[in-house]
Image (tube, rainbow, N blue to C red):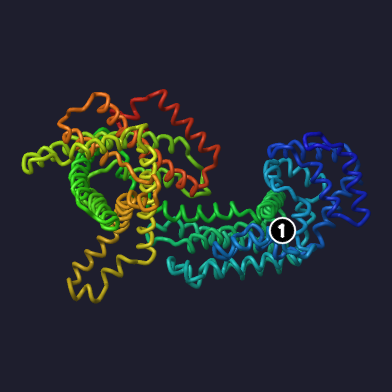
Amino acid sequence: MGRDERPDLRAVLERVVALDDAGEPIAALTHLVAALRPATSGGGEAQVLALCDRLQAGDEATRRALADVVRRAVGGASCVHTLTESGIPADRGFFDELLLKVGRRALPEVEDPRELREIVRAVFPDRKDYAWLAAVSEATWHRLLDLLGLTADTVVGVPAELASAVRVLAHHVSSLGLSPEITGRMPELDDLDSPFLLLTERVLRYTQRCGRGDPHDTATALTAALETLEACRAAVVALRANKHRFGTSLRLTSLSFRLLRQVERLEVLLRLTAAEQRAFERAVQRLLVELVEAENTRDRVGRHVRSSADLLAFQIVEHAAKKGHKYITNTAAEYWRFFVASLGGGLIVAVFAVFKLLLAKEDLSLAAEALLYSLNYAACFIVIYLTGAALATKQPAMTANTIARSLGAPEGRHELDQVADMIVRVWRSQFVSFAGNLVCAFPMAVLLSELFVTTGGAPLASPDKATALLADVHPWLSGALFYAGVAGVFLFLAGLVSGWADNRNLYRDIPARVAHHPLLRRLVGRDRAAGLGAFVDKHGGALLGNVFLGFCLGGAGTLGVILGLPFDIRHIAFSSANVGMALDGLAWQVPGSVVLEAALGVVLIGFVNFVISFGLTLSLALESRRITLREHKAVAGLVLRRLARRPWHFFLPPRRASST
């Protein structure tokens, strides 16, 4: 029977009962799930509804028999390890977990067939089973459980396996919540009234009373356990929300995600024992989907790599984002102030472009050339940063992170309109920054070239060099656009390095350690040492990012020569300055078509610089917030609609501050 065909549920149920009568309840459930499995993940609702209709139209004996199948398949299973581990991140390093997954795919493990996770794997073998199960609504689950008689009223006490799992999870949550990595950043969690200290006691009290004493006492004990668990969740959320104060590490970020998953699983298990029907139904549905998803995706290497990348991205994005706000203009006054800052950036680039051209005239070894070019670029970017000037291509890696950070936590609701509005503002800020850089870099390079002629008797660029500089920016007869893409990748990486360094400084308390360094205090005094610590705190990440970018741009061409590959960089501001020096070196005796081609090349280089660096950073930043592909498309649609309605907002500021 094809998956698109509607199964004969009467015959399916008869087969299920027959398999159960033969002592094969797991095979019976597997047969039922195979019949219900839809062709698409969204078809789960219709399939389960059809089963409900069939059960309702049938007799009580069939419903009771199917409920017995479920009880027999699951009732004798060993559940503790499954309930406490399946779907919860393991406490292993990235490579250890990766090797484990690869090893299991190459040589599958042989596990106890009585283990619940093995039963889940047998009943739901398709790797997309979790998707169609998740598509089934709460109301449909309620109807199915009611028809089978699997309700909260049937739960009396806490089964031994479930009670063990609840207590084990409570111990895990308490232990992890009191680990030095967490209490070191939130000392209040180590107090005597810490919720992590109280949790195991209150969970134990509940499991001992459940089904054995006064129902009121049991309900009170459950409420106390759930309130303590909620306090644990709030503490972890506060820890993550305050990471900007003390930084984080991949280890701490991983611990916080793992702890939250343990808290969520413990809550589900406690709700599973609740007498309240709605809580019981939601717990059954959530637990089933979580376990099936965990087993369906257990050995997916790509999912593991992506999950680890999400943690790393989230860690870096949080700190890179703090630098991005100043690069996004909202009002006309901010727009024009940014334009003036960009003029300063263009002026500085022109000066260092002259230095680079002078270095190129020297007979340098490849190593010396790479080093001096790198130092020249790094010095240029540092001067721009310290003077408050603006360089257009340095901003996308910061602004993209700011956009993502505005969305809130990965688990939060994503305001896509807000993302689209910020993208418009970023584009507008980039446009005015590009304009400011070009308006100043090009004429300033020409003036410096003329000054060189006046003082030295010869232009900066010889005719041959000038011709080569113009050829280097040709939009289709050179590799300019590809090299601009390479520069965009380096700009993206520089943003990551800057965010990583800022986070590392906070996490390792580097500024305070610098300020209190005994030798430094003896050499420069307490006040100057404190000032140096504050400088590291404020500027350390940005300076390291600028140095990293300078060495990437300065060494790329040399690396291409060494490897014999077409590998180099093109940067809009430096390219515009090079065009200015080239035209002056040729005494402006250049065909108009060549000038237009050079101008087009410079503009396209800037566009590629921006699109690559901004696109890569925004993708990583949105990934860190777990934005789905559908939401990516929705954001693109919102941006295009804004472009159609008010295209001028992409280039000029509104008269009043607004969302776009």
Q: Quadrant of the C terminus?
A: top left
Residue 487 image-quadrant placement: top left
Give the residue displayed 68% in from the left and 58% down from the top: 105
State how many labels appear.
1
Q: Position of residue 8 (x, y in %)?
A: 87, 36
Is residue 440 visible in the rendered image? The answer is no
- Compared with residue 445, is residue 232 higher up or lower down, i.e. above or below? below
Nearest the viewer among 90 and 158 is: 90
Nearest the viewer among 485 and 455 is: 455
| 257 left or right, relative to 184 | right
Is residue 221 visible in the rendered image? The answer is yes
Nearest the viewer among 256 and 30 is: 30
Circle 1 SS class: loop
Amino acid at dot 1: Thr
- Compared with residue 621, is residue 504 higher up or lower down, i.e. above or below? below
Q: Position of residue 196 (x, y in %)?
A: 54, 67
Residue 59 image-quadrant placement: top right
Residue 596 image-quadrant placement: top left
- Compared with residue 635, is residue 545 higher up or lower down, i.e. above or below? below
Q: Position of residue 295 (x, y in %)?
A: 69, 55
Give the residue displayed 28% in from the left and 28% down from the top: 655
Q: Quadrant of the N terminus?
A: top right
Q: Which residue is mark 1?
A: 273
| 277 left or right, relative to 648 | right
- Compared with residue 421, is residue 297 higher up or lower down, i.e. above or below? below
How crowded is the residue under tag 1: few (<14 C-alpha within 10 Å), some, or many (20+)? many
Q: Position of residue 432 (x, y in %)?
A: 27, 34
Nearest the viewer among 623 and 277 is: 623
Give the residue displayed 79% in from the left and 51% down from the top: 150
